[in-house]
Image: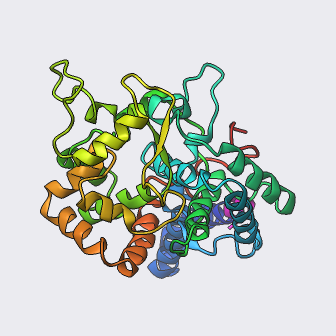
Amino acid sequence: MPTSRIYWRLHSLQQHFKSEASLPLNLAMATGSKLFLSLFLQLLSILFLFNPTNAQGLKIGFYEKSCPKVELIVKNVAADTMSKAPSLAGALLRMFFHDCFVRGCDGSILLDSPTNQSEKDAFPNLSLRGYQIIDRAKAEIEKECPGVVSCSDILALIARDIVAARNGPSWEVETGRRDGNVSIITDAFQNLPGPGFNISQLITRFQQKGLSVKDLAVLSAGHTLGVSHCFSFSNRLYNFTGKGINNDADPTLDPNYVAKLKVKCKPADTTTIVEMDPGSFSTFDNDYYKLVTKRRGLFQSDATLLDNAETKAYVELHAIQKESFFQDFGVSMVKMGRIGVLTGIQGEIRKVCSKVN
């Protein structure tokens, strides 16, 4: 309901109540309580609709009338990007994950800071790439329907479309998010799960976001796409116990895999990157689970999935079964996409994704 109509309705109801109150007592009683109750309920319904906490939430096809080509535009941008730079698939998928886990799925990961104090400046986010792809999609959408589609929705759609473009599943993306206008570097440190987390830490962090143990097992397989810098896991290769012994590797990591990784990653290496899913890093598949069962998960957060009965069972099952994993991934992505969303009149629709209006 447009704001002007809401205020007109409120004003009309106010006049009704004033008129009712000015009647003699016996006449007012004669009008009966039904009229008063009717007017009161109308007032409550209007206030309910106007309250941003009860505003229209996420739904499939939110832009069906206001910007009907939005999903086609994003899909085309994703397809073109994957044809030219398939290595961005993992980075763009991680970007959506990192956005949702910090302040909710509000596009705050996209905001720049003149003092380098926004989320994207936090150490866990320095390896994110592909911001220009979100900007490109936003620019094309703005030409089609200016001021309508949020950057946070574009990020959610891009995540789905790059997965589908890399032979992964597709799913219906709920839209209707609005963009936040706050991005704080320390929030990233406090909310993002780290590559060195154990299973208890991971479960706690996911549950804090309303996600289940199963969601943890499912979404961890996003590591089937993309690359990582050596420094993100080098502690598993060298001096794992902290005793100053360079040959001291993580015993839960396959020794043969350790040897291969050491060829690429020397101690204190801060620049070299390796594939998280060797030989299949640009294809979305279930090879991640195969690697974890063989003790070749790159991070401690991968290996620790074998330390819990539920996550271990999921990993072992889906190392040999791909179809149900694909279905589960779409379901968990939708759940993650609901974390802390802004809807209705909350937040804003940014004109440019890197800065507030």
Any magenta on residue 239? Answer: no
Q: Is residue 94 above or below residue 38?
A: above
Residue 241, position as x, y percentages in the image: 15, 27
Q: Is residue 2 magenta?
A: yes
Q: Using the image as rendered, state which of residue 224 and residue 14 is in the foreground.
A: 224
For this rendering, which residue is in front, 4 or 201?
Answer: 201
Predominant SS of the magenta segment: helix
Q: Is residue 236 visible?
A: yes
Which residue: 60% across, 63% down? 162
* Identity of the residue drawn at 53% across and 48% down: 95
Residue at x 67% of width, y 60% of height: 82
| Depicted 285 relative to depicted 295: above or below | below
Residue 193 point in image, percent of width and height:
34, 42
- Quarter of the rendering containing residue 7: bottom right
Please give left or right for residue 304 compared with residue 333 in the image.
left
Q: Position of residue 23 (x, y in %)?
A: 57, 67
Farthest right residue in view: 143
Asked which quadrant contains residue 261, the reply is top left
Q: Is residue 145 left or right of residue 71?
A: right
Measured from the top left, where is residue 306 in percent x and y? 18, 57
From the viewer's side, name the closer residue of 265 and 282: 265
Q: Quadrant of residue 148?
A: bottom right
Q: Residue at x 45, y 71 (%)?
A: 330
Horizontal arrangement in the rendering, residue 231 relative to residue 150 (left or right): left
Quadrant of the frame with the C terminus: top right
Quarter placement of the N terminus: bottom right
Whether residue 232 sits left or right of residue 117 in the image: it is left
Q: Which residues are magenta?
A: 1-7
Q: How many marks?
A: 0
The colour scheme of the drawn protein is rainbow
**Looking at the image, residue 15 lies above or below residue 87:** below
Q: In this view of the protein, can residue 215 be seen by the observer? A: no
